[in-house]
Amino acid sequence: MTLDQWRRGLGTAISFSVFGLGGLIIGVFIAPLLLIFVRNDTRRQLMTRQLIRQAFKGFIGLMRIVGVAESRIGNWEWLNRPGLLILANHPSLIDVIYLIANTPNANCIVNGHLVRNPFTRGPIKAAGYITNSDPEAVLAAAKTSLAAGNSLILFPEGSRTRPSQPISFRRGGANIALHTGTPITPVLIRCTPTTLTKGEPWYRIPPRRIRMELQVLADVPIPDDPNQPVRHRARALTAWLTAFFNKELEQFSHDRDTRPVPGNQADDYRHAGA
């Protein structure tokens, strides 16, 4: 391991220690206080989401300061609209942090095992995030959340993408879009070099600084065909989204590899989380 990797390894340890401590503070101290003093569930969840968003911005800034990761997001202002159904690929454990940090009042669908994690259980419950334990309950909760003007973040793969493998979506995102009539806001995520993939520990330090790049695409309207059962439409839409994301990700990677990454220029790039 090089000296630079040792330095970034120390920065990674600091970053994730701060992240875990922040989760405990929110879950053990702040969430109970909000439960006591803010009786309205909706207002309490909104306040918790705002707190988590600011905490994630701080985490992104910390990773940048200690040299662990740098990041950019294209068309970031498109995430400022209310009631978005955001579908994204899932290359790394930390990509959700960048999405929540840049999406006002974001709700998200999380794996049920995170509710049993002491570092994430408190914030998830306090923010009212939706767990994927019961598919029928997820659909109802997603519909209620979108109707209230919240944006909903979902990774339709159901798990992190395996490096160098094409993505494959499950039907959850398509089902939510069809049952709620909500257009899909696609977000492409590229993490180079790959890190924090499925089963990869945080202490496996990549050979160089992580670069997280996100690109928000134009909304995808939902096809309306009342003559087809929803399950058939969901299957077709899922297949289309899978092909669409794979094609766009290939082009996105090609574009980023063949031209310099711009700064604050006219193509709507900025530092993510700034």
Image (cartoon, rainbow, N blue to C red):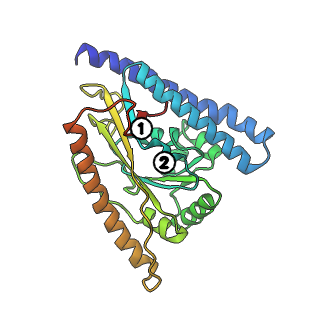
**In this picture, residue 164 sits left or right of residue 75:** left
Circle 2 SS class: helix
Circle 1 SS class: loop
- Asked where in the image residue 199 lies, by quadrant, the reply is top left
Name the residue rendered at 27%, 16% in the picture: 4
Name the residue rendered at 37%, 27% in the picture: 69
Considering only order in the chain, which callout, 2 or 1, is on the residue closer to the N terminus? 2
| Location of residue 12 with respect to 39 vertically, above or below | above
| Location of residue 184 with respect to 13 vertically, above or below | below
Q: Quadrant of the N terminus?
A: top left
Give the label, 1 or 2, closer to the camera: 2
Q: Position of residue 18 (x, y in %)?
A: 51, 24
The local crowd at label 2, few if under 14, some if 14 to 19, many if 20 or more residues have their Cα within 10 Å, is some
Q: Judge whether residue 199 can be spotted in this image.
A: no
Q: Position of residue 211 (x, y in %)?
A: 32, 32
The local crowd at label 1, few if under 14, some if 14 to 19, many if 20 or more residues have their Cα within 10 Å, is some
Q: Amino acid at mark 2?
A: Trp
Name the residue rendered at 41%, 62% in the picture: 220
Observer-nearest of 14 and 240: 240
Distance from disc 1 to disc 2, alpha carbons, whole Å, reads 21 Å
Q: Amino acid at mark 1?
A: Ile
Labelled disc at residue 78: 2
| Location of residue 143 with respect to 27 vertically, above or below | below
Name the residue rendered at 21%, 44% in the picture: 254
Labelled disc at residue 19: none
**In this picture, residue 118 sits left or right of residue 155:** right
Residue for badge 1: 94
Q: Position of residue 190 (x, y in %)?
A: 31, 42
